[in-house]
């Protein structure tokens, strides 16, 4: 009675998730992972229909083909996971080989009445498929989806253990587990029912985890140059300031502005200006250290955060960058354009309780002084420079 109740609940779950996942796959047709997940539950739905209508169907169809439904479903689930984690795609052929190799036995044994052997073969295939999927999830190093992957991997490991236990009991006793070990029958029934709902929900959790990370990343990156935007710079600056407060190692903030960029836009159009900004961003990343942080805060204005540098090293670094910009020829279609940049620099200098807004303001004042000095100049912030820049702005 318990077996039939569990089977009915499982059939209902398979039907519901088959409908939901099919609709999701149709809405997002480019998502191969979701498409294979839907195929797995469609297979389960077909199996559920064969199970519910066995009174009206030939025995080879209602039982022989029915025994293939679950292995096909879990094979599709493996392929879905493989596409999602971008690993283990070739191992799908192993799942296909297991399914095709088992089909003649399922059909033959359903006719000869060897249902115990047929059920054990099904348990063996499910044990192998779930173990393979658990291993794939566990060995993937994608930090974005770490928690849902671990949860799914742990559940599939339990599932595989239960299935291998059922196979071992049959091979040792030559009797079905329900006859000699009711506890394993109850455990397998619980695993069967839970798997129908846990696996798709965990998979959706995994997709949402990756999507959330990607959205957060996109919200911090400038879409044109792929450098950090204001929000990304704020987050990075808070990390560097916290490190500075702990270690006392100085950091520098540099604000730079491309000189007379509006003239370049007027001459070559905004498409040409965007092309220069993109090339300049690549050039900028190549000129700084891996530990340095670069961002664009709007228009032709950029910001650099240089950890572990003092005023002398920061000025030397910026001067090297300023000369390199002036000597570089930027490609504009078939023509070359030369630009210069003005730089404003401020250094933490051992001060405490600094904020990002304060450092950025100081670098802005130094940049304003550099522009007032004729552009293509770098200026280091100090108190006298602050008074000078304030006086210039009031004119």
Image: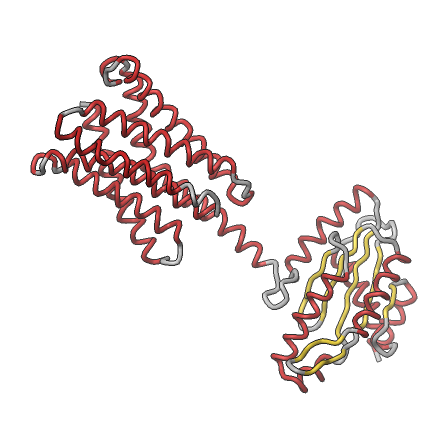
Residue 254, quarter of the rendered image:
bottom right
Residue 81, quarter of the rendered image:
top left
As rendered, which of 391 and 1 lies closer to the eye? Answer: 1
As rendered, which of 177 and 109 lies closer to the eye? Answer: 109
Q: Position of residue 141 (x, y in %)?
A: 55, 41
Above or below, 216 against 225 in this view is: above
As rendered, which of 118 and 327 lies closer to the eye? Answer: 118
Q: Position of residue 194 (x, y in %)?
A: 33, 32
Q: Is residue 389 left or right of residue 130?
A: right
As rendered, which of 376 and 352 lies closer to the eye? Answer: 376
Residue 263, quarter of the rendered image:
bottom right
Q: Position of residue 250 (x, y in %)?
A: 84, 50
Q: How is the image coloured?
A: secondary structure
Q: Is residue 355 left or right of residue 130?
A: right
Above or below, 286 against 34 in this view is: below
In the image, what residue occupies the spot 79% across and 47% down? 244
Above or below, 118 against 320 in this view is: above
In the image, what residue occupies the spot 38% across and 33% down? 130
Q: Position of residue 154 (x, y in %)?
A: 45, 30
Where's the C terminus, which quadrant?
Answer: bottom right
Where's the N terminus, which quadrant?
Answer: top left
In the image, what residue occupies the spot 82% across and 76% down? 393
Q: Is residue 388 left or right of residue 284?
A: right
Furthest residue in direction left, as rendered = 56
Q: Is residue 320 left or right of residue 293?
A: right
């Amino acid at each position: 009675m318990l077996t039939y109740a569990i089977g009915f609940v499982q059939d209902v779950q398979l039907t519901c998730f088959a409908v939901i996942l099919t609709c999701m796959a149709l809405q997002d047709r480019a998502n191969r992972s979701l498409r294979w997940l839907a195929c797995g539950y469609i297979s389960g739905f077909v199996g559920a229909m064969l199970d519910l209508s066995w009174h009206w169907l030939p025995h080879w169809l209602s039982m022989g083909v029915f025994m293939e439904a679950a292995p096909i479903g879990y094979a599709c689930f493996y392929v879905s996971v493989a596409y999602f984690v971008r690993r283990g795609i070739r191992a799908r052929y192993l799942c296909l080989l297991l399914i095709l190799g088992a089909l003649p036995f399922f059909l033959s044994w359903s006719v000869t009445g060897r249902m115990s052997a047929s059920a054990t073969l099904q348990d063996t295939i499910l044990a192998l498929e779930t173990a393979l999927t658990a291993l794939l999830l566990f060995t993937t190093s994608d930090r974005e989806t770490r928690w849902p992957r671990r949860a799914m991997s742990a559940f599939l490991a339990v599932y595989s253990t239960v299935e291998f236990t059922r196979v071992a009991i049959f091979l040792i006793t030559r009797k079905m587990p329900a006859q000699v070990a009711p506890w394993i029958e109850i455990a397998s029934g619980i695993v069967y029912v839970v798997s129908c709902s846990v696996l798709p929900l965990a998979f959706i959790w995994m997709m949402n985890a990756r999507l959330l990370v990607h959205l957060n990343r996109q919200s911090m990156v400038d879409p044109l140059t792929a450098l950090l935007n204001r929000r990304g710079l704020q987050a990075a600056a808070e990390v560097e300031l916290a490190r500075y407060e702990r270690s006392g190692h100085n950091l520098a903030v540099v604000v730079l502005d491309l000189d007379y960029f509006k003239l370049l836009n007027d001459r070559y159009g905004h498409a040409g200006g965007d092309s220069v900004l993109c090339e300049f961003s690549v050039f900028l990343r190549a000129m700084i250290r891996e530990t340095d942080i670069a961002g664009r805060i709007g228009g032709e204005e950029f910001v650099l955060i240089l950890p572990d540098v003092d005023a002398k090293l920061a000025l030397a670094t910026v001067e090297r960058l300023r000369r390199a910009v002036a000597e570089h020829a930027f490609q504009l279609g078939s023509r070359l354009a030369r630009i210069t940049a003005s730089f404003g620099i401020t250094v933490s200098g051992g001060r405490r309780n600094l904020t990002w807004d304060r450092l950025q303001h100081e670098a802005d004042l130094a940049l304003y002084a550099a522009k007032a000095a004729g552009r293509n100049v770098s200026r280091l912030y100090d108190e006298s420079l602050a008074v000078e820049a304030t006086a210039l702005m009031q004119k």
